[in-house]
Image: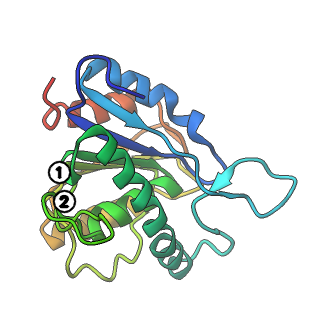
Amino acid sequence: MPPHEGTPSHLMVLLHGYGGCATDLLVVARSWQTRFPSLACWIPNAPDPLPHPTLSGRQWFDLTERDPREIEIGATTAAPGLIHRIEDELHRDGLDWGELILAGFSQGAMLALQIGLRHQADTEVRDVDDHFGSASPAAILSYSGRLPAPQTLDGLNIDAPVLLVHGHDDDVVEPYHSEMAAMMLAKAGASVRLELLETLGHNIDERAIRIGADFLDKIIST
């Protein structure tokens, strides 16, 4: 989705949740692009279908046990392929990692946190595989997510501000996961903001979209 006006100042990558697809986040993208006309958005579909043939939707990685080790392995394994795709989008728009905004919902939020906090990318020097080298993205937004491998915080990209939004009534990914992530990231030195929304379940509502836009207002030049 190209920016509404001119050349893009930032690329927003929006990652859908487990069992979802790219269209799930169109409302979010359109709302933010209306507020920030220079924002380009890319909403990829996850590469894999759900494992059961009767279930529709897609997944970034398998979630059968939903335990911390499975999420750590899954996010670590899924990240490189998505990073290649993101770098292609950045290159096409003439942007670098410092102009990348990562946002995701549920499983997509886990992957956004994994890539944004742990991938090493360089804005100026590329290697023979045409990869960016070491810099943080402009921002990371996690909706109803959880932090993969919270016990391993060494070497995180802590320059990017992080927004964690979670429904107080979420019974799919319990809100304590975002509370724990906020505590661990603050301990590591990251700039992190936590918003727990009353009466919200496993979803993104208008309040959550507005909170994200207000957060981005400090990052995106309109």
Q: Nearer the viewer, residue 89 or 210?
A: 89
The way the protein has been coloured in the rendering is rainbow
Residue 145 x, y percent position in the rendering: 45, 56
Residue at image point 57% right, 60% down: 60
Q: Which mark is residue 46?
A: none
Q: Image height check: is 183 above or below 103?
A: below
Q: Nearer the viewer, residue 89 or 181?
A: 89
- Badge 2 marks a residue whose secondary structure is loop
> What residue is shown with label 1?
98
Q: Nearer the viewer, residue 71 or 88?
A: 88
Q: Image height check: is 125 above or below 5?
A: below
- When asked about the image quadrant of residue 7, the answer is top left
Residue at image point 13% right, 29% down: 221
Looking at the rendering, in which quadrant would you find the N terminus? Answer: top left
Q: Residues within 10 Å of mark 1 (few under 14, many from 20)?
A: some
- When asked about the image quadrant of residue 64, the answer is bottom right
Residue 121 x, y percent position in the rendering: 23, 65
Residue 39 x, y percent position in the rendering: 28, 29
Amino acid residing under circle 2: Ser
- Does residue 184 show up? yes
Is residue 184 shown left or right of residue 54? Answer: left
Residue at image point 34% right, 67% down: 180
Looking at the rendering, in which quadrant would you find the C terminus? Answer: top left
> What residue is shown with label 2?
136
Q: Nearer the viewer, residue 36 or 122?
A: 122
First in sequence: mark 1 vs mark 2: 1
- Badge 1 marks a residue whose secondary structure is helix
Marks 1 and 2, how far apart in space? 6 Å
Dots 1, 2 in contact, CB < 8 A? yes
